[in-house]
């Protein structure tokens, strides 16, 4: 199996750090705006990866196009995550933003993921990279059981069982 391209053989695990993890979901408005959904996702990934790396924030984004749902996990210093969430909440590319979970954790689950795009319905995750032409598939990566538990939570949140809005 191919490893995450952001992880290098010479990398050593960073020491444990206290971090704040926030999970939210929202209703996507990408299909309502100009351009394509794919270009909208590419724009989100490109900006978030650059900004998150600078702020020490990591995480993953789940987008379920069929029902137009986003779910995202953000982790890092609490003040930085809370400030980023305020910015995200005001973003016009979605609505009905709701926090689903927050937790203080002794360690990051997504330490090397500036922002990953996660697959829906239990399909294999297809890591995507932002390019000048949109988004393209990158090499697959391994996930831990703890990471998979959070990613499953994101998938479940985007399926919106019984939700009308």
Image (cartoon, rainbow, N blue to C red):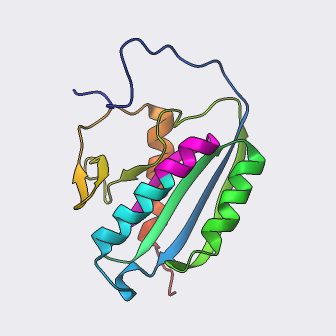
Q: What is the quadrant of the N terminus in the image?
A: top left
Looking at the image, can residue 38 be seen? yes
Left or right, 55 with respect to 13, comes to right
On screen, residue 62 above or below 28: above
Q: Nearer the viewer, residue 51 or 116?
A: 51
On screen, residue 145 above or below 24: above
- Residue at x 51% of width, y 35% of height: 146
Query: Which of the 4 image quadrants contains residue 141?
Result: top left
The image position of residue 36, as x and y in percent, is: 28, 77
* Outermost residue, right side: 79
Left or right, 55 with respect to 45, comes to right
Q: Which residues are magenta?
A: 49-63
On screen, residue 54 above or below 48: above
* Outermost residue, front side: 132
The image position of residue 90, as x and y in percent, is: 64, 75
Looking at the image, can residue 155 be seen? no
Query: Total marks drawn?
Result: 0
Residue 25 covered by magenta stretch: no
């Amino acid at each position: 199996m191919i490893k995450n391209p952001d992880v290098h053989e010479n990398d050593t695990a960073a020491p444990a750090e206290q971090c704040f993890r926030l999970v939210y979901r929202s209703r996507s408005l990408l299909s309502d705006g100009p351009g394509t959904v794919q270009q909208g996702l590419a724009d989100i990934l490109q900006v978030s990866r650059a900004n998150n790396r600078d702020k020490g924030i990591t995480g993953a984004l789940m987008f379920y196009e069929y029902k137009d749902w986003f779910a995202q996990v953000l982790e890092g210093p609490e003040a930085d995550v809370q400030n980023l969430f305020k910015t995200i909440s005001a973003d016009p590319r979605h609505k009905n933003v709701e926090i689903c979970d927050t937790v203080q954790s002794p360690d990051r689950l997504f330490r090397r993921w500036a922002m990953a795009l996660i697959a829906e319905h239990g399909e294999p995750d297809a890591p995507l990279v932002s390019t000048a032409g949109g988004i393209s598939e990158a090499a697959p990566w391994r996930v831990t059981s703890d990471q998979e538990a959070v990613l499953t939570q994101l998938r479940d949140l985007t399926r919106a069982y019984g939700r009308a809005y």
